[in-house]
Image: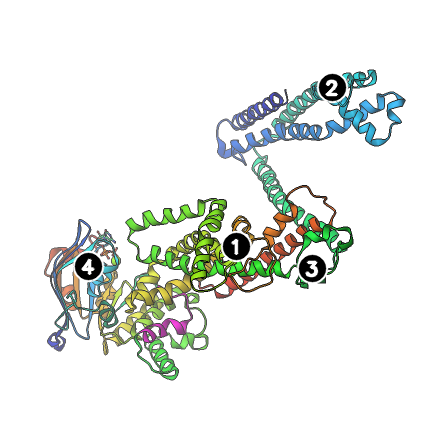
Amino acid sequence: MALASTLPKIVARDVDCFYGDKQALFCVNLDISEKQVTALIGPSGCGKSTFLRCLNRMNDVIDGCRVTGKLELDAEDIYGPDVDVVKLRARVGMVFQKPNPFPKSIYENVAYGPRIHGLVSNRGELDELVEWSLEKAGLLGEVKDRLQEPGTGLSGGQQQRLCIARAIAVSPEVILMDEPCSALDPIATAKIEELTDELRENFTNVIVTHNMQQAARVSQRTAFFHLGILVEEGETGKIFTNPGNERTQDYITGRFG
Amino acid sequence: MNLLLLAVLLALAGAAYLLGRRRATKLVGGDPRALHSRPTYHGYYVALWCGLPALALVLVWWLAQPQVLDRVVLAEAPASVQQLPPERVDLFLRDARSLAYGGVTSGTPTPELERAAERFRSLQTAGRVGLSAAALSLAVAGLTWGRRRVSPEFRARNAVERSLDVFLVSCSTVAILTTIGIVLSLIFEAARFFALVSPTEFLFGTQWSPQTALRADQVGSSGAFGAIPVFAGTLVITIIAMAVAVPVGLMAAIYLSEYARSSARAVLKPVLEVLAGVPTVVYGFFAALTVGPVIRGIGNTVGLDVASESALGAGLVMGIMIIPFVSSLSDDVISAVPQAMRDGALGLGSTKSEMIKRVVLPAALHGIVGAVLLAVSRAIGETMIVVMAAGLAANLTANPLEAVTTVTVQIVTLLVGDQEFDSAKTLAAFALGLVLFFVTLVLNVIALRVVRRYREQYE
Ligand SMILES: Nc1ncnc2c1ncn2[C@@H]1O[C@H](COP(=O)(O)OP(=O)(O)OP(=O)(O)O)[C@@H](O)[C@H]1O
Ligand SMILES: [Mg+2]
């Protein structure tokens, strides 16, 4: 495949992560290619979310969490001493496992990011950007007439797409999605999968999922974690048809996890 | 004796519970699934039948006994006593009772009095015996009746739950009735006041000098009961107090919930709450003896004329007193904002302060408004600090450096000491109380509206 030639957007080398004394990640080495979807799979508690949170330093928020090793975004150290976390998170956006729209109107939810980052200079531009983001997230049609209603009044699937719209409104380079479909019905899931595929044009995408079919459908590369160790990583097609490791094989065929 | 009766009744009810439960179990041969209601409910049912009627009887008798005894004794007293004027009859009965139960009589006992006392004593003993017998037989009858009704199909649970319902409703009714009673008494007393002084004069007059109204030629004379200066004083002091308490309390809450490390929080929060436990009298003399002179000293050095008792001093100290209310309640609501909200904001690249200003505080706003309004009510109702530090003079002024007086202080000064409760002066206290009650009520209603309107729900 031609995709293999793209440059790595994010590089992780020998990454360890600790919660207090408990080690959650062991020496993870992973390249995440630009403008591709990388799926992280593995049994519960294996460190997928932890790894994801390392990439935009959301782990900083957790008391006692420590990350060592090298993590680079476009060859710049993510944990470097003069990195501005706020800027980093604007470049590496995140969609959480549980939809968490702000208790504001739909419009304000999407406008939040552009406002704080000063991405627009007037109301007209902001309106346009909000519409564009909602459109991209596949939500515009459903909410066009009620942009001023609270975002928390939407259904779970709509809320999750609202969170995606909110994330892409700041035009990040990378979007991290932590089990974005875990609370959604098949239709909403299909919509988000479709969306993930489209987003590939503009964004680098890392998605955590427990759904093997989903990983196979949406991703180009897949990484399998087990007990905090990155067991295997490679092209999605290869991982699912011809895994190199027995544990990977067991997991994707449903023999454990 | 009475306590003993109660104890026996309770014991009987306990026994009734056990009996009912056992009978229910036995009727179905030990298989509780064959019963409509669980055995315990049958137990409660029998216990209720055993205990409630008997207790009700005891209660009624206790309430009625004094009147009944008085009537009987009076009816048996010689005609000479019965023909006395009512207040002398009362005195006679009172003396007879004291003589009977051991107390002080108003003179040397006459033979009639001795006889009446003797009658009181015998009647009381008879009443006691009769009551015990009646209550106990009622309890036993109830027990038997209740126990007879126990059967597998009997819906004991529904019956028990219904009586529980009635009990709970009557509890809340008591609370509501008490409140209504207080309000009604305020209204009636205030109405008596407004019969002496016109409401417009009271509400819009600018002169407050109730003391002079004691002189006969000035009762209700114009201007003496204008409450505006008093309410203005309350307003000034409340504003000063809130100007201190709201910013400081809110900032403290934000620090505690967002910035403080958990070890610091564990120390600071209780310490701050200790402030709330300091008696207001202590704040009062702090205001009068420390803060007042300091303000006066500062005023003098910059050439301002400061009264030794000033609204500023009282307001500042009251503000300090209220800080913990605001901070503690706000801290609770701010901490209750889900971590997911914070993560969402941070994940979009917000700085911490943006996250607090734009996401956390709006989400907690309803609780913060509630905290502030609670603090306002507290400030309006606070008395001690103001009595000690703000003075008694009803000045109509917006200058915080002068002495002012508040509604609560005036109520205290109007009612302290020996007073006739029918002069305009004392009745004015009820009018002030009524207006105060009304103001806080309106404040609370507005608060509820505001909160509901601007509430951001994050569930
Ligand atoms: N805040 C925390 N404090 C302490 N330990 C944590 C914390 N968060 C995660 N862990 C631990 O780190 C390990 C990895 O957790 P992580 O959340 O990354 O798992 P996961 O792969 O995302 O699982 P799931 O699929 O259930 O979401 C787990 O053993 C977990 O107990
Ligand atoms: Mg997870």
**In the rendered image, which residue does mark 2 sit on?**
B99
Q: CA distance from mark 1 to mark 4?
A: 81 Å
Image: magenta residue range: A100-116
Q: Magenta segment: does it hold A162? A: no
Identify the residue at image location x=44%, y=57%: B297
Residue A227 x %, y %: 17, 53
Residues flagged by tags 3 and 4 on a common chain: no
Q: Quadrant of ligand 2?
A: bottom left
Amino acid, disc 4: Ile
Nearest to the observer: residue B206 or residue A196: B206
Identify the residue at image location x=43%, y=52%: B324
Question: Is residue B18 rendered to the left or right of residue B74?
Answer: left
Nearest to the observer: residue A77 or residue A129: A77
Characterize the local packing of mark 3: few (<14), some (14-19) or many (20 or more) Cα atoms within 10 angstroms: many
Q: CA distance from mark 2 to mark 1?
A: 55 Å
Characterize the local packing of mark 4: few (<14), some (14-19) or many (20 or more) Cα atoms within 10 angstroms: many
- Give the label, 2 or 1, closer to the camera: 1
**In the rendered image, which residue does mark 1 sit on?**
B309
**In the rendered image, which residue does mark 4 sit on?**
A252
